[in-house]
Amino acid sequence: MKHIFNKGIDLTKPTFLMLHGTGGNELDLLPLAGMIDDEASVLSVRGNVLENGMPRFFRRLAEGVFDEEDLIFRTKELNEFLDEAAVKYEFDRDNIIAIGYSNGANIAASLLFHYENALKGAILHHPMVPRRGMALPNLAGKHVFIAAGTNDPICPPTESEELQSLLEKANAKVDLHWEHRGHQLTREEVEAASQWYRSL
């Protein structure tokens, strides 16, 4: 997978896995990593799927309708890439926090849904429920921050609340932060994520 790895100053800190939104790339979210912890290592990945020339992490059938088969395949592909990257760049595979926006947040949530040990935690900006009707692994000890917009036309508030509920039922500790905005990524929610991260 096309990516950037920046080795951090403090290798005891988590490695941030940066996952962009539709049409973004591996450069998009690098400033976020710096705002949250400028001493952490950063692995920023570009999605392997193109939709009308725009990079994404998995295919969709329509707005808000995921191609479930492709989602499962791409989630497995990303999880295996993390295994390989941890060896190549010598970071702790068990200490990865995903930071994703929109489509990137959805694939990060999918990692949590499918693989017990894929992530230590996640910061999910405007995520949706990746899959319904599946048994989640035991996510005890995992910390998740969800940033959502009360007026988000793409990801309605009920979606964020349902995702919180599903993760909590799997024993994850979830903080849900609301902005009175739409689907855009705001500085305020990044600052809230930074405060949450520092409280871990």
Image (cartoon, rainbow, N blue to C red):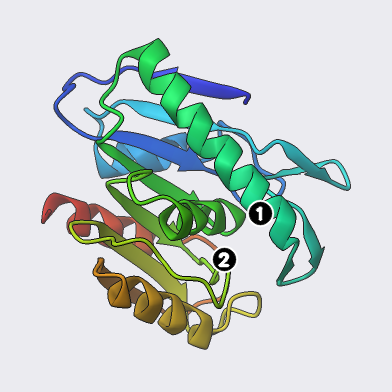
The residue beneath circle 2 is: 130
Q: Can residue 180 be seen in this view?
A: no
Among all residues in the image, which is located at the extreme bottom?
A: 158
Q: Can residue 199 be seen in this view?
A: yes
- Of residue 34 and residue 133, the one placed in the foreground of this image is 133
Specify few, some or many for label 2: CA neighbours under 10 Å numbering under 14, 14-19, or 20 or more.
many
Coordinates of residue 84 in the picture (x, y in percent):
46, 20
User: Residue placed at 57% from the left, 42% from the top?
Assistant: 76
User: Residue placed at 51% from the left, 21% from the top?
Assistant: 4
192 sits left or right of 123 in the view: left
101 sits left or right of 139 in the view: right
Q: What label does residue 153 carry, if any?
A: none
- Real-space Cα distance between discs 2 and 1? 8 Å
- Of residue 159 and residue 139, the one placed in the foreground of this image is 139
Specify few, some or many for label 1: CA neighbours under 10 Å numbering under 14, 14-19, or 20 or more.
many
User: Residue placed at 41% from the left, 48% from the top?
Assistant: 99
Count up the numbered dots: 2
Coordinates of residue 78 in the picture (x, y in percent):
55, 37
35 sits left or right of 85 in the view: left
Q: Do the residues labelled 2 and 1 touch (CB within 8 Å)?
A: yes
Residue type highlighted by circle 1 = Leu
Q: Earlier in the sequence, mark 2 or mark 1?
A: 1
Within the image, what quadrant is residue 171 found in?
bottom left
Q: What label does residue 71 carry, if any?
A: 1
Coordinates of residue 40 in the picture (x, y in percent):
25, 29
Measured along the vertical axis of the image, is residue 38 above or below residue 159? above
Within the image, what quadrant is residue 1 found in?
top right
Residue type highlighted by circle 2 = Pro
Query: Secondary structure beneath disc 2?
Result: loop
